[in-house]
Amino acid sequence: MMNKPSIPLRIKRQSQIPFIVAWVFCLIFYFSQYAMRSAPGVMLPELTQAFSLSAVGLSTLIGLYYYTYSLFALVAGASLDYFGAKLVIPAGIAMLAAGSVLFGLGFSLSAEFGRLLQGAGGAFAFTGAVYLASHGFSGKYLATAIGVTQCFGMLGGSAGQFLVAPLIHETMNWQQFWIDAGIVCLIVAVMMFFVTPKAEAVASKEKGSLRDMFSPYKVVLSNPQSYLCGFSAGLLFLPTTIGDMIWGVPFIREAAHLDFSEAVKQVSMVPLGWVVGCPLLGYLTDVIGRRKPVLIGGAVFMLIISLAILYVPQAMLPPYLPGLLLGFGSGAAMIPYTIIKEVNPDHVKGSATGAINFLVFTLSALMAPAYGWLLNTLAVDSHITMESFREAGIVGIVGIIMAIILSCFIKETGSQRYPEMTVKAK
């Protein structure tokens, strides 16, 4: 006969439920944040005309998001550990909302400041969701929960392309989209405040100066494994954050000579691939009890598909499959997010996620304008050709190879390597 759960276990499960509910609402925040991150990629002509920008200027404007995203990833992680989630996550949503409205005003200065605010607020989405998942799910299912989290983010990334494109060309102008999106985010912020449970943050037990809020980073950033996780994930992110979300539509139009609408549909397959790849690969690491084989295998698969997309004539490739497969393989970039939490102490959960987000998106912030400059340099008579994309694409290929090499030095943290983790999870 099966024994009934003990009272302490039932109490623990009941205490986890509010965090799971709050995590579900935070997924809406993450969905919205990713939609705003990818949306500029389908309105490049409108933004170019509105702000009179070159390829470099356009990459810089859109890339401003990643500067504040990477910086505030540190703030988000530390503040979650110090204050808890109830005030911190709604504040992040409010910043995202304000940034969206400012971007939609249509002035250069407000657009720049708005994009910076979007990045600052958006940094609280994934970090907040992982923080809530860490309190709501056992360690046995954490990788799966993180995969589902990223799945919702990439659904937003896909929606920011295939849904926003027809909206701004048929229903509303691009400015109205940003203003309406800001209003929706403000409503989500209010809802998030009411559903998020109060919790005594670990760091808040020892009151000290505000500087103490960032003390967990001494632990995380003094661990070499944190850097291996951050840089391997960051290099695997570049083909999506820059290659797909900024330059994906121009690439497909140049490569396959397609109209705008069809190019958007094909590019949106990449984040849709993440929708499948992130939770499936995360679940696979939990099932086999190994992180590294899935991480390296996904990166190798991603490398093969990237080479095919860049160098195989588009007429020889199925229309939608390559992007879908690229997104599926790049879902492996989320596995280091699980590993970094496992190679660092439990009391720095939020800061570990903040640190890896900082490392990942600092790379994106630096590479966005650099890639735009490279494309501009390789342009023929001010026109970015297919050959320009192929030559510049070497950057992404080398990045994936470097990620594979770095992954070989990451410590295995799966339950098969450390069986006591499974016992602890139960």
Image: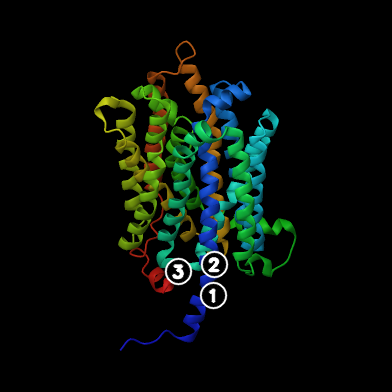
Q: In this view, does 369 lie above or below 424?
A: above
Q: Residue at x 63, y 64 (%)?
A: 194
Q: Which mark is residue 19?
A: 2
Task: Give percent across and percent down for residue 23.
Answer: 52, 61
Q: Nearer the viewer, mark 1 or mark 3?
A: 1
Q: How is the image coloured?
A: rainbow
Q: Is residue 68 above or below residue 379?
A: below
State the residue position of label 3: 138
Residue type (three-letter) at the residue carrying disc 3: Ser
* Mark 2 or mark 3, earlier in chain: 2
Tell me, yes or no, whether the two marked residues, 1 and 3, touch with CB atoms within 8 Å.
no
The answer to whether any part of residue 298 appears in the image is yes
Residue 329 or residue 196, whichever sits in front: 196
Task: Give percent across and percent down for residue 291.
Answer: 36, 56
* Element at label 3: loop
Q: Which mark is residue 15?
A: 1
Residue 424 is left or right of residue 309, and the answer is right
Task: Give percent across and percent down for residue 131.
Answer: 54, 60
Question: How far apart are labels 1 and 3 at the CA level?
Answer: 12 Å
Tell me the quadrant of the picture where the N terminus can be found. bottom left
* Element at label 1: helix
